Amino acid sequence: MTDESSFLLGRLGWDALPFWDMIQNPTRESIINGIIASGAAGMVVLGALAAAALITWYGKWKVLWCDWLTSVDHKKIGIMFIVIALLMLLRAVIEAAFMRAQQAFGLGGGFLSPEHYGQLFTTHGTIMIFFMAMPFLTGLINFVMPLQIGARDLSFPVLNSVSFGLTAAGAALMMISLVLAPFSTGGWTGYPPFTELQANPGPGVDYWIWGVTLSTLSSTFSGINFAVTIYKKRAPGMTLMRMPLFCWTALCTSILMIFGMPPLTVATGLLALDRYLDFHMFTADLGGNMMNYINLFWAFGHPEVYILILPAFGVFSEVFSTFSGKRLYGYTALVIATMAIAVLSFTVWLHHFFTMGQSAHINAVFGIATMLIGIPTGVKIFDWMLTMYRGRVRLTVPMVYAVGFLILFSIGGLSGIILATPSIDYQIHNSLFLVAHFHNMLIPGLLFGMLAGYTYWFSKAFGFQLDARWGYRAAWSWIVGFMLAFFPLYALGLLGMPRRTVAFFDPVYLPWTIAAGLGALIILYAIVCLMAQLWVSIKRRDALATPGGDPWDGRSLEWDTPSPVPEYNFPVLPQVNSHDAFYRQKCDGAPHESPARYEPITIPKNTAMGVIIGVSGTAVGFGLTWHMWWLALAFSAVALVAMIARGFARNTTWTLDAEAIERQQRAWAHQLEQFEPITRQWEQSEANRGVPVPPNEGAIQ
């Protein structure tokens, strides 16, 4: 390589192409793995080209730029977060299916190389935590929370756009790593010394470092934004104890983000110093201590578990209450339990490494703390069941996810109590039993909650419901597929099968690995059902339209708006006098009551800051990964100049006049008068236009 090309391309060469090793060393193993890797890279490239071609064909570039990418509307940013999450979920599930297939055929070898298998389980874990779960919950909170507290937007709309740009940049690096390989083989936790330069000098660990760093910065900014919004932007009369429980879980999640994300940002930054500047923070020599990294990582990692779970708890609280036709049982107890979980989540990080050398006394303290956290979680389980008790339960698609969660999450929690005992954890810590437990908490706990919320609030975002038939197929496939894919892993762990192994030589494992492989196929079918549901719903959007805005006979303020919600959310900020504020309006016979007079509304203008930071973050991360120093420096300068220039911007808002607001609201009120109110038995039919019958006409509340 010449000096010029070395300057321009750094260490990027032909060997970064996924098919290069297959061409240079055409063995059976390299050909199989090269075909799989090249197929994945081809899907990324073709998918990007197809998306660009469709946008060009339909002439939507201006719409994409003006209405979405530069928008600071919390609803649109929330939707874009969720789009990233769903795309990354698709990739991560496909990778998981390859891992399960490898284990199903793993007796004596299988078809994946150890290096390729290591990349798969690293990318799968990294994507599911940082680029599926975090964007999904951030998107839901972004969309729903300001509506539920009666706010017009988040406190810092531009920072919200920047947060999205950082997440998009991290996700872009993850997708680029499929095309210009390899990725890290160090696991989603990135433990040194394996991720240090001496053990892993290639670009894979650097992809991981910069992708994760961008994600953690995004989440920290989002946490600050959410917390300030809840503290400062609640509608008149919306006291903390009148907030919907989803907002309480959003508040506690935000606090966890603010204090839980920086330790990981620090850890990845220090690891980068080791790799780039020959520091010795976590090396095995010259004063380094790898346990410092592990403590920093899990100081993030266990609060992170509840960052993931608490928003789902909030979703389930809304779902159980709405589809049981009752006020949430034990609201105050649920609030206290949520806060207790948030506090206790900072006291249990060491249970992730009981086996790493600390004294038995320290392990015992953290084991007890781990068991204690099950108490407030148990309070929630019982309160949700009592909410359903003697209610008129409707088994809608979100409710199927919620009931599946209750059963499966309880099983996962019991396995967690087993692992909280240090002496037992010593025996099964590095086995598939731990993998089963981890997924038993996060798939029913997090993913089912996010999918329930996606289904529940979809009509509020787009003005039409998701198709129920495909929704039921997806929900039941997720539940059955999860049980078949992960319950066998408990047995494999007790039989002694280690986690992260590419192959095994004991035939007693084989029936269980085949069963888990079949479960992975059912989960793939669930993904297909979700895609089909979205496609069918878009095709039938006129028949499934719910412009009335209240298709589920909801109880909180977001249902007191048209679907889709206008940019300003509420024509006049609502006056809240009770818990379940919108339900109280319906009981008083005055839902969607028009104000006496309208006032102009000030709305933030669009800005390209999020796009600039996103593009710059991608370029800087890519440049640092491949040692293209000019690229990293140039786009660092672009980001810095953009931030300074934004500080001088003064014309940052526009005003929507009162007459325009009144016209829109009168048009919606006239539309509501044309619709026939429906009872709950028809809420998943085409008769539902988002206008339920009043509570005094027979609906059990």
Image (cartoon, grey):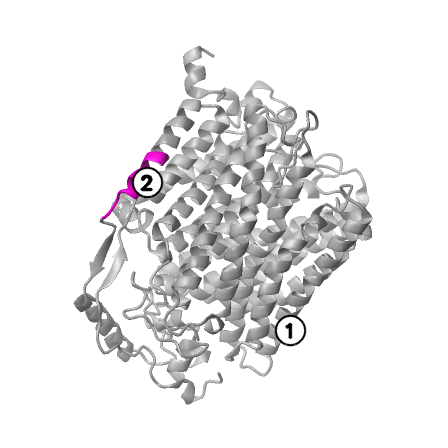
Residue that label 1 marks: 382
- The answer to which quarter of the image holds residue 372 is bottom right
Q: CA distance from mark 1 to mark 2?
A: 51 Å
- The answer to which quarter of the image holds residue 50 is top left
Disc nearer the start of the sequence (1/2):
2
Residue 389 percent across, percent down from the top left? 60, 80
Residue at 78% over, 54% down: 364
Residue 104 percent across, percent down from the top left? 69, 44
Q: Secondary structure at mark 1?
A: helix
Q: Residues within 10 Å of mark 1 (few under 14, many from 20)?
A: some
Whether 31 is drawn above or below 588: the answer is: above
For the residue pair 644 and 379, the one nearer the viewer reads as: 644
Residue 270 percent across, percent down from the top left? 57, 33
- The answer to which quarter of the image holds residue 337 is bottom right
Residue that label 2 marks: 53
Q: Amino acid at mark 1?
A: Phe
Magenta-highlighted residues: 640-650
**Residue 449 seen from this side:** no
